[in-house]
Image (tube, helix red, strand yellow):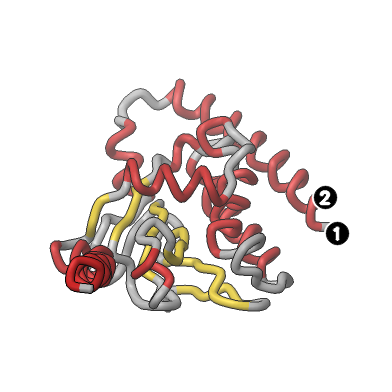
């Protein structure tokens, strides 16, 4: 079965499941949406590096020091396990390349088409696809892997996710894991800038 045929098949299955769930939900009014979400999804646990339904980001040595908005990106499944396109034909799981995240953006899994159940399916499909791809820093990279996952699940009813959109939305929506995470992201850039300004002023 081809990649896109598998995608269409999964989407058909997801829509069928979602229809069945909607009918079941109408019949069972005793369970609140909050209770359902608590039963199905893990909680954020920064100390254990668990970021359920999050896009995560960590600095790239040298590159982030010069351009702080550029870094390494991954996406976590509903159990909080991070998937990141770490190199040619390699998608890491629970072992993020370049270190654990310094910031994260928590998504709403129910904004995925066909609901939360489809979130993990499409994430794993994107990861499987990128295990067959060569890494290209400029054109097909870790951001592209995350963008494909969001496009497959039609997150926020959109299929136009790309590396540039993710780069700037991560700036707007992300939270730092700690003050140390903030320092790890910005301190090298600030020190380098201070050195350059000092050199220019002195010489």
> Residue drawn at (28%, 36%), measured in percent from left and top?
34
Residue 10, position as x, y percentages in the image:
70, 47
Q: Is residue 18 above or below residue 77?
A: above
Callout 2 crowding tier (Cα within 10 Å): few <14, some 14–19, many ≥20: few
The residue indicated by pointer 2 is 5
Depth check: 165 or 198 in front? 198
Task: Identify the secondary structure beneath mark 2.
Answer: helix
> Residue drawn at (62%, 52%), measured in percent from left and top?
148
Q: Is residue 69 left or right of residue 90?
A: left
Q: Is residue 76 above or below residue 148?
A: below
Depth check: 203 or 97 in front? 203
Depth check: 9 or 27 in front? 9
> Residue drawn at (48%, 73%), measured in percent from left and top?
93
The residue indicated by pointer 1 is 1
Q: Is residue 96 left or right of residue 179?
A: right
Residue 198, position as x, y percentages in the image:
18, 70
**Mark 1 and mark 2 residues within 8 Å of each other at the beta carbon:** yes
Task: Identify the secondary structure beneath mark 1.
Answer: loop
């Amino acid at each position: 079965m081809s990649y896109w045929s598998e995608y269409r098949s999964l989407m058909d299955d997801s829509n069928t499941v979602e229809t069945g769930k909607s009918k079941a939900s109408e019949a069972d009014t005793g369970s609140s949406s909050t209770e359902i979400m608590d039963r199905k999804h893990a909680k954020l646990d920064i100390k254990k590096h668990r970021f359920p339904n999050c896009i995560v980001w960590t600095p790239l040595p040298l590159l982030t020091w010069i351009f702080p908005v550029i870094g390494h990106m991954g996406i976590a499944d509903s159990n909080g396990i991070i998937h990141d396109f770490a190199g040619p034909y390699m998608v890491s799981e629970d072992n993020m390349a370049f270190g654990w995240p310094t910031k994260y953006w928590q998504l709403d899994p129910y904004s995925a088409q066909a609901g939360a159940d489809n979130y993990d399916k499409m994430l794993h499909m994107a990861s499987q696809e990128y295990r067959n791809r060569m890494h290209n820093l400029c054109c097909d990279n870790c951001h592209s892997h995350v963008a494909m996952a969001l496009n497959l699940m039609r997150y926020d009813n959109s299929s136009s996710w790309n590396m540039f959109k993710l780069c700037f939305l991560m700036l707007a929506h992300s939270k730092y894991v700690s003050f140390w995470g903030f320092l790890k992201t910005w301190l090298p850039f600030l020190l380098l800038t201070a050195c350059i300004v000092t050199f220019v002023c002195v010489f």
